[in-house]
Image (cartoon, grey):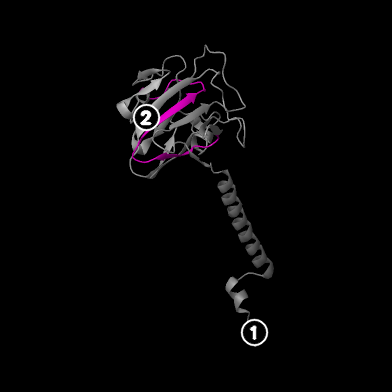
Amino acid sequence: MTQIDDSKAQLGLPRSGRLALVTGVLVVVGAALAFTFAYLISYPSTVVAAATASDTVVLQSVGAIGLGNHPTWVSYMAQENGNWVHSTVLTVPANSDVHFKIYQYDSGSPLRNPYMDQVAGTVGGTETLNGQVVRIVNDNADGGIGHTFAIPSLGVYVPMPGISSLQTNACSTPVPCATTFDHNTVEFTIHTGAPGTFTWQCFVPCGLGFLIGNGGPMSTFGYMGGYLKVVA
């Protein structure tokens, strides 16, 4: 009587087929590990944007980051201890009025929804634009809206106008941009509640070269979106 190799019978594959299957599994697992490792090393570092309620969160938005894997992508940068960092993961104190200052160096355009001209969720429902307190930013004015700072789960929405087409001293790479370049300065204060992690993002489609402007930097943390970590 012929003895049957149970393992071969269960697989129903010749030796070469089993080797191909094992090789395929190893390739898939290796690719998954490589993707995970690449994600972990590219994930933005956490910036202590405001250690206490008396600190100001300082950001800038630029038309092209000029470094890394996507040098042409539009991006935010954050300041930590006076140094500019390419990150959008920000730590701020809980149960505090936290002040933000954003230098906006990018150009803009009219919005598809003018309702987004309105400031929301800030202390007093206002922002300070180049020293002037406003509740609405006209996206049909020259320069339009360059970017927004929005935290949907907290109801925060701050429109930031683009630089005027008449200005000739626009910032170009390398970043960070100095305040000697044309820009708009936007300031506002939000009240943070209990500790938690909240997604923030830009709602102006500015992913040049992607479908309806919503791909690339618009959907990538470290560029036009990030996390606001509210800590005790």
Residue 103, x across and y down, in percent: 48, 24
Position of 178 relative to 95 (above/below) = above
Tell me the quarter of the picture where residue 85 sits. top right
Cβ–Cβ under 8 Å for marks 2 and 1: no
Residue 125, x across and y down, in percent: 31, 26
Seen as rendered, the residue at the extreme left is: 124
Q: Within the magenta stretch, is there residue 103? A: yes
Q: How many marks?
A: 2
Q: Mark 2, residues whose alpha carbon is within 10 Å: few (<14), some, or many (≥20)?
A: many
How far is mark 2 from mark 1, CA to CA? 79 Å
> Foreground: 50 or 113?
50
Taking the image as shown, residue 21 lies to the left or right of residue 141, namely right
Q: Amino acid at mark 2?
A: Thr
- What mark, if any, has residue 189 been given in the picture? 2
What's the residue at 60%, 23% (across, down)? 172
What's the residue at 55%, 33% (across, down)? 83
Which range of residues does the magenta coloring cover? Answer: 85-114
What's the residue at 46%, 21% (across, down)? 185
Q: Within the magenta stretch, is there residue 162? A: no
> Foreground: 81 or 74?
81
Q: Amino acid at mark 1?
A: Gln
Tell me the quarter of the picture where residue 9 sits. bottom right
Residue indicated by mark 1: 3
Position of 164 relative to 41 (above/below) = above
Q: Is label 2 in a helix, a strand or a loop?
A: strand
Taking the image as shown, residue 98 lies to the left or right of residue 84, namely left
